[in-house]
Amino acid sequence: MSWDAYVSNLTANGVLEYAAIIGIDGNIWASNFGVAALPSYQADVPDEKNPDIITKVAYDEKTTFVHALTHKGEPGNVAGIRINNQKYYSISFDGEQKSWYLKKNKGGACVAWSNTVAVFASFSQTINAENGAPQNASDCNKRVLDMAKYLADSGY
């Protein structure tokens, strides 16, 4: 099975918005993002005291993702966690269970990893799955955790 098939499996039936298989080094093995690599760009960061004031900050998704995985979900960048140019907030990071839960505006994401690979998927409460129900955290978390376990059990 190609890595793209794993992404298709994660997003089957429209249950998830985005999914990716990402090496622990930050390289994308497969995704439905439409990009071959986690990008670098200028991110808008609102001022803490006056949110109307925006500062542009250099942002590298790959570097920040790898840093966060090895630093308990802390991004090491004032722009926070961004994946596929979407801003996320860390809700829970468990290094022992190798799982990380994230929140975004009207949705969220889950990341789970093994020794060599991370599984990422996001959901949007504004998108309905094929069954008519909105995408949700429960489906996202279950699919990501199950896929990461499968990959770990397969030697990844």
Image (tube, grey):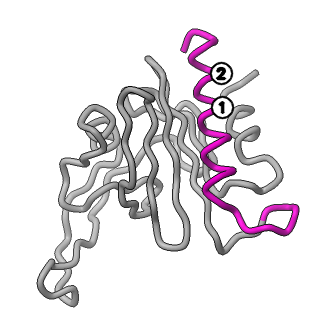
Residue drawn at x 34%, y 48% as measured from the top left? 61
Q: Would you call the spot at circle 1 few (<14 residues within 10 Å), some (14-19), or many (20 or more)?
A: some
Q: Residue 37 sits in which quadrant?
A: top left
Residue drawn at x 46%, y 27% as measured from the top left? 23
Residue wearing tag 2: 150
Q: Is residue 50 left or right of residue 148?
A: left
Which residue is more in the foreground, 139 or 3?
A: 139
Q: Would you call the spot at circle 2 few (<14 residues within 10 Å), some (14-19), or many (20 or more)?
A: few
The residues bearing labels 2 and 1 have C-alpha atoms spaced at a distance of 6 Å
Q: Residue 20 sits in which quadrant?
A: top right
CB under 8 Å between discs 2 and 1: yes
Residue drawn at x 27%, y 31% as measured from the top left? 70
Residue wearing tag 1: 146
Label 2 SS: helix
Image coords of residue 45 (percent x, y): 23, 72
Which residue is more in the foreground, 109 or 24?
A: 109
Q: Is residue 131 left or right of residue 136?
A: right
- For the N terminus, the quadrant is top right
Which portion, as a residue range, is magenta? 129-156
Residue drawn at x 63%, y 49% as measured from the top left? 140
